[in-house]
Image (cartoon, rainbow, N blue to C red):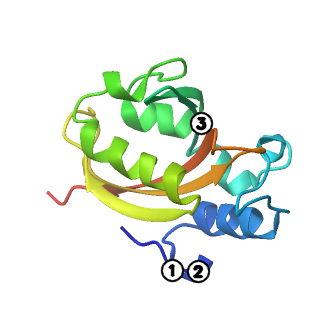
């Protein structure tokens, strides 16, 4: 998991643009307010591969999932809890790291349950919140095709 990086370190234009966007937003206690999670304001290059998660108790609720992300995963996840996804434990721990530390990160991991021709994915995770704890995470994904 990378916790210190710049936009040029990220593999896709969507992730680079989203990180620059997040970095330039006004922040309170290190994170931008959730009002800035606006699909009309977010970089177009990131929209189809993004997910917006809401922190709910000790879990995360998918509030929005981009169309390309939904296609890659083979299922619509809007409204789902992250804890209900297969093999969610490792990813959930990383998500809580962003909540606790109020910092973005980039990580790569293995996906075993999606029906497409990839097994590795990367995700840029950007925390948002108002006064108090982080309440939303913006995730921008990339996928690595499996070599055949």
Q: CA distance from mark 1 to mark 3?
A: 23 Å
Q: Are marks 1 and 2 in contact (CB under 8 Å)?
A: yes
Q: Residue at x 62, y 69 (%)?
A: 16
Image quadrant occupied by the N terminus: bottom left
The reply, left or right, for residue 103 in relation to residue 129 is left
Q: Is residue 19 above or below residue 86?
A: below
Q: CA distance from mark 1 to mark 2?
A: 6 Å
Image quadrant occupied by the C terminus: bottom left
Question: Which secondary structure lies at badge 3?
Answer: loop
Residue 94 percent across, percent down from the top left:
38, 52
Question: Which secondary structure lies at badge 2?
Answer: loop
Residue 121 percent across, percent down from the top left:
34, 54
Q: Is residue 67 above or below residue 81?
A: below
Q: Which residue is mark 1?
A: 9
Q: Which residue is mark 3?
A: 66
Residue 110 percent across, percent down from the top left:
23, 51
- Determine which of the numbered discs, if any, sits on residue 46 in the image: none
Q: Residue at x 26, y 49 (%)?
A: 118
Badge nearest the viewer, 2 or 3? 2
Badge nearest the viewer, 1 or 3? 1
Q: Which residue is mark 2?
A: 6
Which sits earlier in the primary sequence, circle 1 or circle 3?
A: 1
Q: Bin the neighbour count of mark 2 within 10 Å (Cα to Cα): few under 14, some 14-19, many 20 and up.
A: few
Q: Bin the neighbour count of mark 1 within 10 Å (Cα to Cα): few under 14, some 14-19, many 20 and up.
A: few
Q: Bin the neighbour count of mark 3 within 10 Å (Cα to Cα): few under 14, some 14-19, many 20 and up.
A: some
Residue 40 percent across, percent down from the top left:
85, 42
The reply, left or right, for residue 98 in relation to residue 85 is right
């Amino acid at each position: 998991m990378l916790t210190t990086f710049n936009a040029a370190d990220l593999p896709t234009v969507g992730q680079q643009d989203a990180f620059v966007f997040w970095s330039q937003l006004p922040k309170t206690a290190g994170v931008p307010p959730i009002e800035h999670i606006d699909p009309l304001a977010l970089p177009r290059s990131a929209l189809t591969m993004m997910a917006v998660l809401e922190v709910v108790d000790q879990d995360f609720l998918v509030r929005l999932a981009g169309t390309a992300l939904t296609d890659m995963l083979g299922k619509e996840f809007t409204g789902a809890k992250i804890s209900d996804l297969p093999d969610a434990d490792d990813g959930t721990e990383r998500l809580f790291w962003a909540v606790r530390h109020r910092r973005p990160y980039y990580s790569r991991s293995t996906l075993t349950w999606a029906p497409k021709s990839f097994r590795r994915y990367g995700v840029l995770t950007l925390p948002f919140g108002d006064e108090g704890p982080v309440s939303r995470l913006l995730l921008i994904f990339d996928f690595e095709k499996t070599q055949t």
